[in-house]
Image: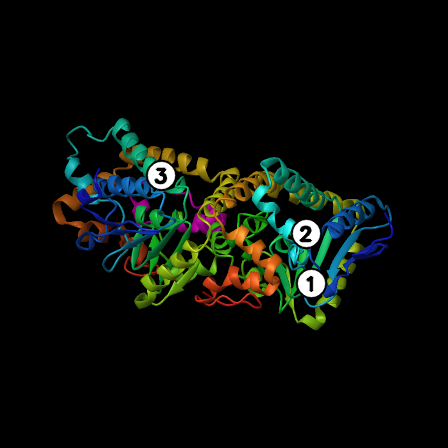
Amino acid sequence: MNMLEYKTLIYEPGRITRIINNQPQFHNKFGYEFQDEYTDALKRFDQDREAVVAVTLAVGRNFSAGGDMRAYSQKQSWDFDSSYQYTEETWRYEQERMGRIFNSIVDCRKPMICGAQGIMVANGMFLALAQDITIMSEDAFVGVPIIRVSGGGGGLESDLGYRYAMEFFSTGWNTSAQELYRRGIINRVVPLAKLEETVMKYANIIALMPSESLKLIKNSLRFRAYLSGAFETNLFSREMNLTAHLASEAEGREREFYKMILEKGMRAACDVRDKPFEEYGFSRYKANEIDI
Amino acid sequence: MSDYKTIIYEQGLITKIIHNEPETGNTFNETFQEEYVDALKRFEWDKESSVALITARGKDFCTGIDLSRYIGNHKEAEKFSYYTEVDWRYEYEKLTSIFLSIWDCRKTLVCAAQGACLDIGEDFLLAHDVIIMAEDAYIGAPMMRLSKAGFGLLGNFVGYRIAMEHYLTGWNMSSSELHRHHAINRVVPTEKLETAGEKYAKIISFMPREGLKITKNSIKFSINRRGARESIIYNMGMNIDGQMASKYQGPQIEFYKALAEKGVEAALQLRDSPYELYGYDRQRVTEI
């Protein structure tokens, strides 16, 4: 793949390499095309002898609204009377694909910084939290509301702590950038207007360091994370996701959700999904606490 | 060994080990390393001792390696350009065994630290069990700007991204920030540091002696199961790789050359001035 061919992102090589998700009209969705291009861009950065540190940013209001749900709904008939097109094999393909991209992020030998704003949902959240240094704007929040329909989630226990991870994935609630900072999960929260400037300052400082040492420092800290099971947890989470998708067939909830996207649109489907939770204070457009 | 030059050893139910080189910033020099390991062994095998309280005299707890030995000493400063992998392995195997002797000590080690805890001094501090820090205390890893060096112990106690930022920038981190991340037990006003350390040691000494060892054993099992001890050993290899790579990167050789020719201040200035543009100050804690 040539960098000129990238459709979803802008790749700016250099000592500080910038990789910018450029699909603001789709809220920087985490679709197949972006997955392939981001993986390719990372490989390019990792093998570029001049490049020391990568910065990942996104154009527009939201960092990433997660998977391309419309693509799922168009591929599948979601008809009660017809057989499923998404078999165990198809879901496995999806999960393996996802596994490849996240492995390419965590295995990248050089440091990666991310500046994220607005909404980071599901895989959009994992993209921001797979990075080495994460800076968020004041309006940013993460969430996995899709887990109310299906999916196994997990994979962030070492970041969130056991009980908070349980709350997060068992309710599909959103968590603000400030709360992530309070828990020591991200490095900094800054006003939206200063997000890019702050990220570039971090990148400039890191670019001053000896490049081989940077790789060794990362290697050393990753080693510790892997000994704690971080890598295996990711693999296992994807297996759990696969199992959850298959289990959801019996419940019918996932089928209903994607059928509604196809027939009535995304907003109507999300409304049905989130309504029972809204009674307890949930809003998918912001991070708020569970009403007590 | 009983005639210690760098430390004061006060034996008792609470054994006090005091680093006593305030005039040099309590550097982690070779004599101190040997004496500290010896003192720890003595404490560990002393059947009367329950807990050790580790402190340091003067303004700073530990300012890292002893840079003064290189001033005017061109031969010593140039050694980094001809050191082989075997030479570096010798240096780091020695340091690793020191850290493992602290990490593996069966009895409780309480540490009270003030001022700067830099580079290997930061790892030295974080290797202990209960840590009280003064309000003015901070850790920092600015030598990372020359080469990968150190045992990365911070990674055991704070989240991945926080540890990455600390080591990838060499920035200072305050005692209150360490407390916010649950990496230390308490932050107290500087004038209350010694009393606070003694109070913690006193309370711990009330506990059943064998119970203390077993409790530590159990908690160490948990942290080691998550890779803490393996990481110390793995970091030894990473440090050797880092030193070998630094031969070709320049800043380390330039640094020691400046140290030999122009002294500590000039060398530190050379190392830190690019970072100062972004708000770094090696004497205190600043935000990026």
Q: On residue B128, which mark appears?
A: 2
The quarter of the rendered structure image containing the C terminus of chain B is: bottom left
For the record, the magenta segment spans A144-168
Asked if labels 3 and 1 touch by Cβ distance under 8 angstroms, the answer is: no
Rounded to the nearest whole Å, what is the CA distance between mark 2 and mark 3?
A: 36 Å
Colour mode of the rendering = rainbow
CB under 8 Å between discs 2 and 3: no
Depth check, front residue: B93 or A104: B93
Looking at the rendered structure, the kind of residue marked 1 is Gly
Q: In the rendered view, does A164 fall on the left or right side of B204?
A: left
Q: Nearer the viewer, mark 1 or mark 2?
A: 1
The number of numbered discs placed on residues in the rendered structure image is 3
Horizontally, is B221 left or right of A112 in the view?
right
Identify whether B37 is placed above or below A96. below
- Are discs 2 and 3 both within one chain? no
User: Which residue does the numbered mark 1 point to in the structure image?
Assistant: B25
Q: Does the magenta stretch include residue A121?
A: no
Query: Residue B189 at x, y = what percent?
Result: 66, 71
Q: Which of disc 2 and disc 1 is earlier in sequence? A: 1
The type of residue carrying mark 3 is: Ser
* Secondary element at image label 3: helix
| Residue A253 at least partly seen | no
| Residue corresponding to mark 3 | A104
Asked if residue B226 lies left or right of residue A194, the reply is: right
Q: Give the x, y percent position of residue B68.
A: 67, 58
Dominant SS of magenta comes to helix
Q: Is mark 1 on a helix, strand or loop?
A: loop
Disc 2 residue type (three-letter): His
Chain for mark 1? B
Q: Distance between the residues labelled 1 and 2?
A: 20 Å
